[in-house]
Image: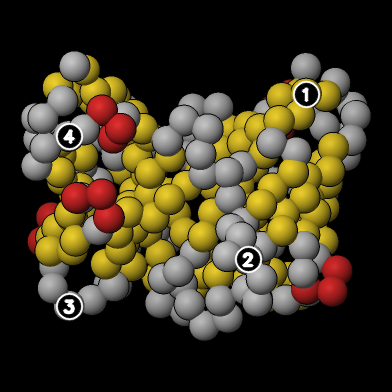
Amino acid sequence: EAGVTQFPSHSVIEKGQTVTLRCDPISGHDNLYWYRRVMGKEIKFLLHFVKESKQDESGMPNNRFLAERTGGTYSTLKVQPAELEDSGVYFCASSPFDSLNTIYFGEGSWLTVV
Amino acid sequence: AQSVTQPDIHITVSEGASLELRCNYSYGATPYLFWYVQSPGQGLQLLLKYFSGDTLVQGIKGFEAEFKRSQSSFNLRKPSVHWSDAAEYFCAVGRYNDYKLSFGAGTTVTVRA
C-alpha cells in the first residue's frame, strides 16, 4: 500500500514567487491534514480536510496560503506570494474517517524562500 | 489549548546505552499522546500512542513510553540504543473528537559508537 506522498520534496523559490505543494493521501483516507515546521520551531497544524471540505483551517497563517482538495482525493497548498518566513517543511498526513489514532505522515516538502 | 514541552533539544548517547526522552504536556482532560520519529530524509513515523488503559505502552523498534497523569508526562524509553535510532523525536498530544495534534519542539538524538 502506498503511503502519503508529497511533491516536490524540495523547492527553492524567490520571495514574491508562487509555490504549489501537492499531497496524495493514502487511498481511501477521508481525512487529510497539512502541518508545517518552520526552522527551529514546533510542527504546527495548518488545516484539516474531511473529503473535499475544510473541517478546520484555524492554523493557516494568513491569506497568502490557499489549500484545496478537489474531489476529495489529492490536495494542494499554494503559497502566493511567498515570504522569507514561509521557509520550512510542510507535512501532509492522512487518516481514515473515524480515526485519530492512525495518522500517517508524508516525508514532507522542504521549502526555501530566498 | 493543549501544549507539549520537550525539555531536551539534543541528547547524545552511546550505542548500547539506555535512552530516555522527556515529554510534558498541558491539557485539561485525558489526552491522546503520541511519539513520532523522523529519521534523516524520512517522514514522521509513529512509534507509539496512548489513548487509555495500561499506562505503559509498547511501540515499534523496541521503544516504550509511560503515561504519568500526576506528572503530566509521557516519557519515551529504550533500554539499548542502536546506531539507527539516531533521529529526531517528537512528542504530540491530541484530544478526543479533535483531529488536531500539538507537537513538541523535538529532541535530536545522536548515537556515538
Write down the chain letter for disc 1. Answer: A
In front: B32, or A69? A69
> Is B59 situated above or below A91?
below
| Mark 1 or 2: the one toward you | 2
The residue identified by callout 2 is A26
> Is B71 situated above or below A36?
below
- Residue type at mark 4 is Val
Write down the chain letter for disc 2. Answer: A
Instruction: Give the secondary structure at mark 4.
Output: loop
In front: B20, or A74? A74
| Earlier residue among tags 1 and 2 | 1
**Residue B39 placed where, x, y %?**
42, 35
**Residue B21 placed where, x, y %?**
21, 39
The residue identified by callout 3 is B53
Instruction: Give the secondary structure at mark 3.
Output: loop
Asked if labels 1 and 2 share a chain, the reply is yes
The residue identified by callout 1 is A12
Taking the image as shown, residue A80 lies to the left or right of residue B65, namely right
Looking at the rendering, which quadrant does residue B113 occupy? top left
